[in-house]
Structures are given as C-alpha cells and as structure tokens.
Image (tube, rainbow, N blue to C red):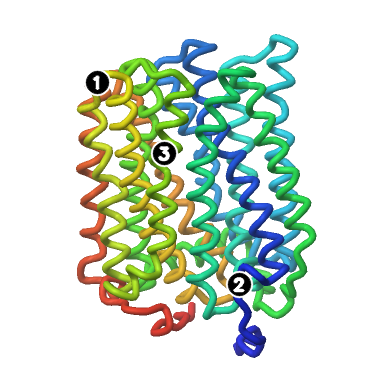
Amino acid sequence: MTDTTAAKPKVALWRNRQFATYWGGQTISEVGDRVTELALPLIAVTMLHAGPTAVGLLTAAVWLPNLMSLFVGAWVDSQARKQRVMVWADALQGLTMLSLPIAHYVGAITLGQLFAVALIAGAASVFYQTSYSSFFVSLVRRDQYLEANSLVSTTRSGSFIVGPALAGGLIQLLTAPIAILVDAVSFFVAAFLTRRVKVDESMRERETSDESLLHKSREGMRFVLRHPYLKASLRCSTTINFFSFVASALIILFASRNLHLSAGVIGLAFGIGATGGLLGALLAARVARRLGVGPTIALGAVLFCAPFALVPIAGGPVWARAGTLALVEFISAGGVMLYDINNNALQAAVTPDFMRSRVSGAYSTVNYGIRPLGAVVGGLGGELLGIGPTMIAAGIGGSLSFLWLLGSPNISTRTIDDLEPVGA
C-alpha cells in the first residue's frame, strides 16, 4: 500500500493543528493521571489502612484488563473509526474517576470501590491503547514517527514533573479522593479535544474479513510471536514490565511507611526525579542517531530498572531520604524515554497497517498483562521477604532484560528509515 501521507508538505509537527489538538488533550490527561497514580494507593494506605498485599493487588487490578487486549485489538481492527473508540474510552475513564470524590463526599468510599475503579478504568484504557496505534499512523507521516513519539513522550515526562508535586499538594489540601477530581476532568477534556481532531482513517488498511474474533486474535498473537523484531521486543518489554511493577507496587508504601515521608514530599521527590524523563525524551532521538536505535533501546532497558535497587539505601534526614527517591526516579525515567520512544517507533515501522490494532492487542496482552503478576509478586515479596530485598531483586532482574535483544535484528538496527513492514 502506498502511504499517501508522504506527499504532504513537511511542517514542524508541533505546528500541525491536528497533531497539536490531540497532543494538547493528551498532555492535560497525562497530568491528571499523575494525580491518580499517587492518590489511589494513598487512599488505600492512609484512609483504609491497606498493607503491602492489598496495595499490590490494587496495582494489579489497574493492569489486569490488559489480559483481554488480544481480543479487543482484533475487534478494533475491524472498526473503521478508531478515533471514536478512543473518545468513548476517555469519557468512561472520566466518569469512573468521578465516582471516587462523590463516594468520599457521602462517606461511602471503600477498598472494594477502589478495586472497581481500577478495573473499569483499566478496561477503558485497553480500548484506548489498542486503537491508538492505528490512529497514530493516520495522524502523522512515517518520517515523523520519532518526532511525534518524542513530543508525546516529552509532555508525558513533563507530567511526571508537574503531576506528582500537584498531586501531593492537592492531597494534603483537599484529601486524596477529592484530588482525583482533577483526573476526571482531564479525561473529559482529552475526549473533547481528540474528537475535534480531523484524520482520514479511510486511507489506512483495515481488517474486513468474516473470520471469527478468536481466529483474528490467534492470528495477531502468532504474528507477534513469529515476527523477527516484535518477538525480541516483546520478551524485553515483558521482562521490564514484570520487574518494574514488582518495584512500583511497593515504592509509595516504602516512601510513606519506611521513609516516613508525607504525601507532599513524596510528590515533590517524584516530580524532581521526573526531570530525568524529560531529559531522556529530549535526547532519545539524538542518542539514537549516535548509538543507533537498537543499542539505545538496550541502554534504556538497563537504566529503566537498575535504579530500583538503590531505594533500600535511603536514610538520614528528610532531604536525604527524599533525594534518594528523586535520584532513583531521575535515572529510571530517563531510561524509560530512551527505551519507549525508540522501541515504539521501531514497532510502528515494521507492523502492517491492517494488523496494527491486533498486533497492539496481542503485544499488550503479554507485555501489560504481566504487570498484575509483577504487582502481586511485589506485594507478596514485600510481605514475606521485606520491601528492601524485593526492590533489589526487581532492580537486578529488570536490568537484565536487554539480554533478550542480543542476537536479534533489533540490536543492530541503526535507523527507522531502514525498516519496512513485514507482512502477515
């Protein structure tokens, strides 16, 4: 298929009205997400007195719906308007988050509701993410993949700077459930702006066969597991996600109970540390030009996880404890950006149009589906072995994920322009 978008005149992507509209909505939504990521576990820990296992299970509930990504992706591939799916998914997440401040207002918030919110919002996110890959290639040209991923990731990194500090302040001022109102509003804004974006989705190939959803789902998984690039990428990403969620299930609990840091200080530490993500997003393309896309992905994988092993050494006065937390976040966030920006661009370049959502669904089923297991293992490890040893194991195990790339074509990839889609 000829990519007709290549004929369009080149304009700086941030000046493109359609991309800027979508980008603006996503930026607002990302800031709201950072509020919920801090507020949700703090509701469980400080208001409902949840322990490590319960917090681990709550983190797992957020990601458990990703196990259905395989089937959702197959269904989305047959939809002509992926943009519409994304809009409804954002709206549903907004309504779900809105239920928490309402329940708090009437004095009815429970741990059961937290789990319900996590599951419903997680399910809506699956529909959004599996639709996004096809929407993305309708929104930007192939030669803009790295630029677009860098811009989106830059503002995502910026949200990790602003969001946690904002969240910490709002939680201390208004309580955690009321702070989540910010996230609810951000989802509604994102839905409105995404709906206003004008993209011609008819220009992309889509699945039109009468085959069953199960058959299409199996086909998507088979494609990912046999694809020379995607199978190596999936193994590396899945390993990272398992061990990073072993750590993420415990880090807020550790900061609150073991380091005795307040919500405001935790938010500030995460916000300062998140500047590493902003730096990584700004440097990702430059590092890839110097080292090559493949080696940059491998470097990002190591830097993403290794810092978790430093968490247990935190001690001393408040500034030292918070500083260690910020340092861990800084290095890890930089690694995330080096990994994600280049790996996402590589995946977009090698995946055929008509299978994008199906491939995204199959990939996410394994890659994100492992996250609940990692969170549960983290909670149980924190309960049985202690939080410190579990964090060290997570840092070491995750940093070894790059070994999956050795011997694969991924590691030798120099530029995205060298890649072509591999047919089913």
Residue at the spot of label 1: 386
The residue shown at (61%, 87%) is 6
Relative depth, front residue between 395 and 326: 326
Q: Is residue 278 above or below residue 34?
A: below
Where residue 387 appears, as percent x and y from the top left, is 27, 24
The amino acid on which the numbered mark 3 sits, given as a three-letter code, is Ile
Q: Amino acid at mark 1?
A: Gly
Q: Residue at x 60, y 25 (%)?
A: 170
Q: Position of residue 323 (x, y in %)?
A: 31, 31
Q: Which mark is residue 13?
A: 2
Question: In 3D space, how far apart are the residues under numbered discs 2 and 1 (Cα atoms)?
Answer: 48 Å
Residue 377: image quadrant is top left
Q: Residue 136 in the image: state x and y as whole percent.
A: 61, 67
Verify CB contact (< 8 Å) between mark 1 and mark 3.
no
Q: Quadrant of the N terminus?
A: bottom right
- Helix or strand or loop: what does disc 1 sit on? loop
Q: Secondary structure at mark 3?
A: helix
The amino acid sitting under disc 2 is Leu
Q: Is residue 194 above or below residue 266?
A: below
